[in-house]
Amino acid sequence: MIPRRTFLASLPPSACVLSACTGLPMEDSAGTPVASLVGTGFAALHSDGAGGAGALLGSAVAVAPGRVACAVHALPHGATRAWLRRGDGAAARRVPVLAHSPRMDLAILGDGEGLLAPAAHCSQAVEAGDSVWAAGMPGIGPGVAAGVVEIPDAILPGFGRAFTARMAALMGYSGGPVVGTDGRLRGLVSALPDGEAASALAWITGMDLGGLAHGRDRRVFILSIRQVMEEARRLSTI
């Protein structure tokens, strides 16, 4: 039986565009392990709109020199380009979509001009009870969420191998980085294994009311950085 799941995907197109979106998570990350990554290796992901960046889609993180990972479900179907806005808000760039995985929720973008600095990876496996922090672009709500690993090894059909954590990740966090206490990248936010109604309401209202109300009780599916890198190599993008 395939588990019910909900994407933490894109916000409604009306929720935020590059010129109006100011909710970068720089201030929210201050004093947390994800702070240094947010300013250098994190980006808001936008659609390739006419005349410049379009609607806010989610988040992205640099995983290797010239390579940025995001959630494939956040990209418009058939998209060949997207816009990245660096976490400090100082620069934005149009980048190509190099590949997307047919078996997990992962797309790899090119960043040949080095808009983002690659995040340092954590080589240790997560364990239940580990503290983790995620950064994302919710449009409305905090840009950083703290949580605790719940299930260290999980598989969600169509999404890949991952771990789950309890944290208040919101819509717009999809593709965003998850780090441990050392600030090293442990994975990418992908989906909610439970609760389709909350996501539907968020799409209609432009606000993730379910996430804001339930806080750290929300279960979040997080792609393992090890699996992300293995898949990126399989796709010949790294």
Image: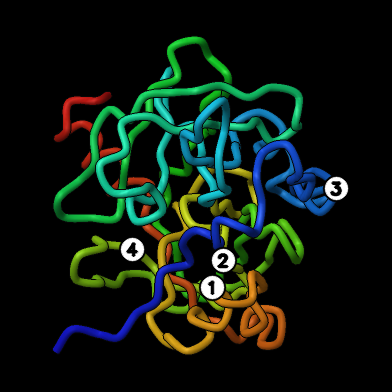
Q: Which residue is mark 1?
A: 203
Kind of residue indicated by mark 2: Met
Mark 1 or 4, which is nearer the eye?
1
Q: CA distance from mark 1 to mark 2?
A: 9 Å
Indicate which disc residue 162 carries. 4
Q: Residue at left 29%, top 72%?
A: 154
Q: Which residue is mark 3?
A: 27
Task: Compare marks 3 and 2 and give the one earlier in the sequence.
Answer: 3
Kind of residue indicated by mark 3: Glu
Element marked by disc 4? strand
Mark 1 or 2, which is nearer the eye?
1
Task: Compare marks 3 and 1 and give the one earlier in the sequence.
Answer: 3
Q: Residues within 10 Å of mark 2 (few under 14, many from 20)?
A: many
Pick the front one: 57 or 24: 57
Report the residue that reaches farthest toward the front. 50
Asked whether, in this view, residue 55 is left or right of residue 186, the answer is: right
Kind of residue indicated by mark 1: Trp
Give above or below for 48 relative to 142: above
Q: Residues within 10 Å of mark 3 (few under 14, many from 20)?
A: some
Q: Which residue is mark 2?
A: 171
Element marked by disc 3? helix
Residue 184 is situated, as x and y percent measured from the top left of the image, at 56, 42
Mark 3 or 2, which is nearer the eye?
2
Q: Are marks 1 and 2 in contact (CB under 8 Å)?
A: yes
Task: Compare marks 4 and 2 and give the one earlier in the sequence.
Answer: 4
Pick the front one: 128 or 89: 89
Q: CA distance from mark 3 to mark 1?
A: 26 Å
